[in-house]
Amino acid sequence: MNLRAAVVGVGFVGRAHVESLRRQGISVQGILGNSLLRTQETCRALNLPRAYSSIEELLGDSSVDIVHLCTPNHLHLPHAQAALRAGKHVMCEKPLAMDAVETAALVQEAQTCGRVGGVTYNQRYYPLCQEAHALVRSGAIGEPRLVHGTFLQDWLLYPSDWNWRLEASQGGSMRAVSDIGTHWLDLIMWITGRSVVEVCADLATVVPVRRRPLGRVETFQKAQSDAFEEVNMTSDDYASILLHFEGGLRGVMTVSQVSAGRKNRFWFEVDGSEGSLSWNAEEPNVLWLGSRNEPNRILLKNPALMSPEARGYAAYPGGHAEGYPDTFAQLFKDFYAYIEAGNFKAERTFPTFETGHVEVALCDVIAASARERRWVSFP
């Protein structure tokens, strides 16, 4: 591809973006961190050509076509707006912005500027999630009736665990739901083709007081200093949400970042009138297929045995595992191919700014449901 990228953010996910872009043969022109020293260190470590000193310098680089935003949530709106106005396309980490007012502004900005916006709901791009999507669309399990699942992690189990997402000023008023719950909701709405229309939510702050280190902490890493201050928490560690979808589909989702031993248990099951299917991100190359009148089956990821629509999202032959890094590569392949084709009125198969707006607006409704202790409709 001839399109060229720059990445804002030098943490865990920023590095994941750089790696996945390179796998697609996309030139990464440079990177920008929150300090020049850190940017330069990362630039050398990743062997990138340019360490930008500011967002203005990055956006002024005429060689950059697409900007990847891998920053704390409160920076998404100003950085995405500036990038769009500078004529760049934008791939933004989720959630798209801090609230639905901001996400609606970004949807409008992209339309006004004639640029393309994507959001990294990359879970869609596991090969067997693509297969689940194809199977449901083909009617292989009949009419979807029930969905249920979890997204469980343990990286914020202890009061001493800390990350910028815990700061409402940087991450927003919601945490587990917006950070990982929107991944689950996006995947299920995409697989079933049904939108959420009503929610009844229970949210909790399981660890009410945390110890904020007096120093930097990377995502999924331990603090480097023993010095800390105690901070009262208000955002959610846990949520269970009853869901009503279009067409009478019902479901329930539980998310947690305080479930010991669960590193990334992103699990779902869709139960239809003729069969069921189930998948778990901790075993991403296995899809369970359930039946009433026949033996249940296990489909191991193998493009030769997958649906034609899903086959292209498996980069390696059967017996060769694919996982988390591959999802970014496949998402970026879709995103960049769409932009390179040049027809921005064509159907978009990747998660868009509109997708990101729906997810954040849904978070607002979930928060209202938990606060008011009742079912709340989602228009």
Image: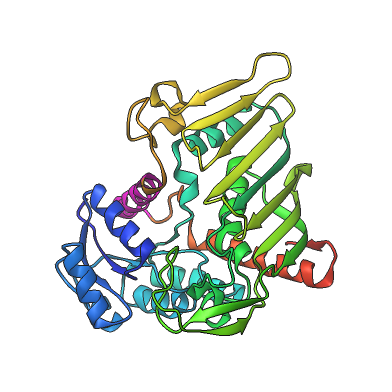
Q: Please tell me whether the stretch drawn in magenta is mainly helix, strand or loop.
A: helix
Q: Residue at image x 71%, y 24%?
A: 274
Instruction: Give the farthest residue toward the front.
Output: 226
Q: Residue at image x 30%, y 52%?
A: 20
Of 56 and 252, which appears nearest the observer?
A: 252
34 displayed left or right of 267: left
Q: Is residue 329 magenta?
A: yes
Depicted 345 relative to depicted 369: above or below: above
Of 268 and 351, which appears nearest the observer?
A: 268
> Measured from the top left, where is residue 262 in percent x and y?
57, 50
Q: Residue at image x 69%, y 27%?
A: 142
For residue 193, what is the image quadrant? Answer: top right
Residue bounds of the magenta highlight: 326-343
Of 363 and 4, which appears nearest the observer?
A: 363
Residue 61 visible in rendering: no
Q: Does the magenta stretch include residue 49?
A: no
> Measured from the top left, where is residue 51 in percent x and y?
20, 74
Depicted 116 relative to depicted 81: above or below: above
